[in-house]
Image (spheres, grey):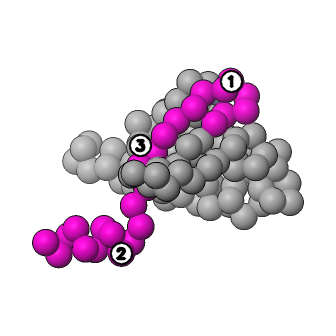
Amino acid sequence: MRRKVREREKDLARQRIVRLLRLADEVYSKEPELGLRYGELARRLALRTRVRIPKEWKWRYCKRCGSFLYPGINADVRIRDRRLPHLVIRCRLCGEVRRIPYLREKRVKRVASH
Ligand SMILES: [Zn+2]
């Protein structure tokens, strides 16, 4: 019984996190500060409830300083196509650089069909 309640709480937290992150993405071009606030709220909620940030947004948090990153606002994002395509994300706040492998849909499908 207890376990079920906790699962339900986690589910609700997950939904709230996704809602906050979507909201953050919606407002950030007009109100970057509000967007950052939503991002921060989502992160705190995730930490408190031990819910993982969904994959789609995982890369948006700086590994070093924990900031919610917005390409063009507090982060630089470049796409490198040499060899393995990957994204290069640099946090403007602490300078942390991260590389994320990036596969295009087609490629993923081709690999999956083999
Ligand atoms: Zn950082």
Q: Amino acid at mark 3?
A: Val
Q: Residue at x 62, y 49 (%)?
A: 78
Instruction: State the image quarter where residue 114 is shown.
Output: bottom left
Residue 98 in the image, given as x and y percentages of width and height: 52, 35
Q: Residue at x 82, y 45 (%)?
A: 33
Q: How far apart are the alpha carbons under marks 2 and 3? A: 31 Å
Query: Pointer 1: what residue?
Result: 94
Q: Secondary structure at mark 1?
A: loop
Q: Is the C-beta separation of discs 1 and 2 under 8 Å?
A: no
Q: Residues within 10 Å of mark 2 (few under 14, many from 20)?
A: few
Q: Amino acid at mark 1?
A: Cys
Q: Which residues are magenta?
A: 90-114
Q: Looking at the image, is 74 positioned above or below residue 57? A: above
Q: Looking at the image, is 95 positioned above or below residue 58? A: above
108 with respect to 29 (left or right)? left
Residue 14 in the image, given as x and y percentages of width and height: 46, 53
Quadrant of the rendered image holding ligand 1: top right
User: Disc number at residue 106?
Assistant: 2
User: Disc number at residue 51?
Assistant: 3
Q: How far apart are the alpha carbons under marks 1 and 2? A: 35 Å
Q: Is residue 105 magenta?
A: yes
91 with respect to 17 (left or right)? right
Disc 1: residue Cβ within 8 A of ligand 1's nearest atom: yes
